[in-house]
């Protein structure tokens, strides 16, 4: 009887510890089962068996315990210690859109803002598309890029089928009463909103009430063909195909801008078009890559950004889905065009922007991975560990970037990354100490240096727990100090050779000297 009681107690603590680890890392039972299969398929448990282990009804085998210990980077003995760690504390910086108290508050009343915003946009030359994208980005970041209503709408059409072939998507279109017509149109030059003319391709457009026109150029790339068709299916489902949509375009003019007007002034209709583009784009991605199946697929491939090639999906789509499906919430994503236009931005971790997606700045930091890759000819994914100082706050990021071409043939760089500080803190490491050690190494080597052994070990451990393979890839290379503006470079050896004088500091010194007598 005593042995039976002891076994039940042992099973209870083992199960409780495994469940605590799983929940702290935001994994479902199915996620953990998939991770176990990755390590050792022959010893991996089913979802139901894992549930019984967590509820103390089964004791895991020695091999299974080794697998789970490896996944969560724990010693096997840890599971037999009858004490529980405190819950994870999320120490990620708040996104910039969280806002701050503004005084005097009455100036930010709804009535005044409605009067002032159009005038502000007109005087600064900001288009409705640009303003809409700022609003949409803030909306995405406040919701961690997760929109269950759009996911459910997509699932109602696709039934979570994954992966989908082109014939499947055409079948969905037919079932919704859409007529597909083809047109021939090749790439042309269009300046749009860029300084230089870019290759431009009109990929597709919607004609109310139920006709979709597809460019035959899409037949050369099934991944892009599926996306465009899914995008128009979204318009039929979400907006009943009313036709109030911009054509889908690659290159000179981005799709959020209406193409039936040459006006550069603010137009409220642009906001409607941009919002619908966002909704339909999100729906299309959810239709082609349902949340649960994609999450398991990415887990199996350690979030490799070129894993999209195995699914006949664009890398853009899969990388933009990563923040929506990953159990780890602290992601960012950039899509950059030369010389430094950020066409798409997502900052679920509040990462400061290196270069605006509305206008160019004169002194961007060129050490960001996304900009370094713009000047590269390589088409292979590349990982980078970066230390970023934002005021007195130091942050640590890892990203993977890849250079490619859009449908019109223009080069651009896709970049997906994660904030490593919350992951370090959740495992009991001190992020500030790790970041300081890496920064010191970088400064000793002119701004880019090897990651110290202890910090590298921590990052490799974090990479295994998060199951993001490119964290270990980045940790094996030199880390780089980055900033928002080169004029404010935080390196001990300024990247521009000598920091330009700061006007504010001169004004402050005059004030101080006068007051001090």
Image (cartoon, grey):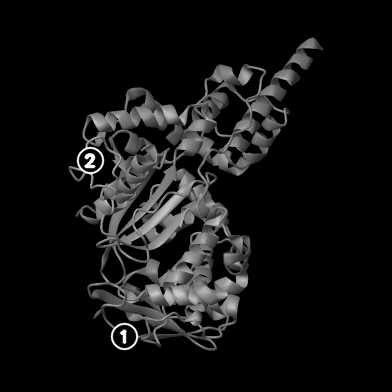
Q: Between residues 405 and 375, which one lies in front from this camera angle?
A: 375
Relative depth, front residue between 473 and 12: 473
Q: Secondary structure at mark 1?
A: loop
449 vs 497: above or below? above
Task: Pinpoint residue 398: horizontal percent, then vertical percent.
Answer: 38, 42
Camera-side mark, 2 or 1: 2
Disc on res. 285: none
Read off the residue under disc 2.
494
The location of residue 25, given as percent across then percent down, is 57, 37
Pick whichever of labels 2 and 1 is earlier in the sequence.
1
Residue furthest out toward the top: 2
The reply, left or right, for residue 157 in relation to residue 281 is right
In the image, residue 235 sits, relative to residue 465, either above or below, namely below
Q: Is residue 282 left or right of residue 203?
A: right
* Inter-mark Cα distance, 2 to 1: 52 Å
Residue at image point 31% right, 52% down: 370
Left or right of 57: which side holds 22?
left
Label 2 with label 1: CB-CB less than 8 Å: no
Q: Which residue is mark 1?
A: 184
- Residue in the picture at 45% in, 73% down: 120
Q: Quadrant of the C terminus?
A: top left
- Residue 256 visible here: no
Left or right of 309? Residue 72 is right
Counting from the top left corner in percent of width and height, residue 314 is at 38, 62
Dividing the picture into quadrants, the one containing residue 26 is top right
């Amino acid at each position: 009887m005593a042995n039976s009681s002891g076994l039940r107690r042992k099973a209870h603590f083992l199960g409780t510890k495994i469940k605590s680890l799983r929940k702290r890392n935001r994994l479902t039972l199915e996620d953990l089962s998939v991770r176990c299969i990755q390590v050792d398929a022959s010893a991996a448990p089913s979802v139901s068996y894992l549930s019984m282990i967590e509820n103390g009804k089964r004791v895991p085998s020695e091999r299974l315990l080794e697998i789970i210990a490896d996944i969560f980077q724990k010693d096997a003995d840890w599971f037999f210690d009858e004490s529980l760690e405190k819950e994870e504390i999320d120490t990620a910086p708040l996104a910039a859109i969280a806002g701050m108290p503004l005084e005097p508050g009455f100036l930010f009343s709804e009535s005044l803002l409605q009067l002032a915003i159009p005038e502000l946009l007109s005087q600064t030359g900001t288009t409705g598309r640009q303003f809409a994208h700022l609003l949409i980005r803030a909306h995405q970041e406040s919701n961690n890029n997760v929109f269950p209503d759009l996911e459910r709408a997509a699932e109602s059409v696709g039934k979570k089928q994954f992966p989908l072939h082109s014939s499947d998507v055409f079948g969905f279109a037919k079932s919704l009463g859409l007529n597909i017509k083809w047109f021939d149109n090749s790439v042309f030059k269009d300046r749009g909103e860029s300084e230089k003319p870019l290759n431009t391709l009109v990929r597709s457009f919607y004609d109310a009430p139920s006709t979709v026109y597809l460019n035959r150029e899409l037949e050369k790339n099934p991944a892009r063909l599926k996306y465009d068709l899914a995008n128009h299916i979204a318009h039929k489902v979400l907006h009943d195909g009313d036709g109030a949509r911009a054509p889908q375009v690659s290159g000179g003019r981005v799709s959020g801008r209406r193409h039936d007007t040459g006006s550069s002034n603010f137009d409220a209709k642009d906001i409607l078009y941009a919002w619908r583009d966002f909704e339909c784009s999100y729906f299309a991605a959810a239709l082609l890559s349902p949340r649960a199946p994609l999450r398991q697929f990415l887990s199996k491939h350690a979030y490799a950004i070129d894993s999209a090639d195995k699914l006949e999906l664009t890398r853009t789509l899969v990388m933009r889905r990563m923040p929506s499906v990953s159990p780890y919430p602290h992601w960012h994503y950039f899509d950059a065009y030369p010389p430094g236009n950020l066409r798409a931005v997502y900052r679920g971790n509040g990462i400061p922007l290196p270069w605006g997606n509305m206008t160019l700045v004169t002194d961007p930091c060129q050490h960001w991975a996304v900009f370094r890759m713009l000047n590269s000819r390589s088409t292979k994914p590349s990982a980078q560990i970066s230390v970023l100082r934002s005021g007195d706050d130091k942050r640590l990021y890892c990203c993977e970037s890849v250079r490619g071409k859009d449908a019109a043939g223009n080069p651009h760089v896709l970049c997906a990354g994660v904030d490593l500080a919350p992951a370090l803190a959740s495992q009991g490491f001190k992020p500030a100490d790790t970041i300081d050690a890496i920064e010191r190494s970088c400064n000793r080597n002119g701004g880019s240096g090897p990651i110290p052994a202890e910090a590298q070990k921590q990052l490799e451990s974090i990479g295994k727990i998060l199951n993001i393979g490119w964290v270990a890839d980045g940790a094996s290379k030199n880390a780089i100090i980055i900033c928002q503006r080169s004029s404010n470079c935080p390196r001990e050896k300024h990247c521009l050779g000598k920091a330009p004088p700061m006007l504010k500091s001169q004004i402050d010194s005059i004030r101080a000297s006068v007051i001090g007598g």
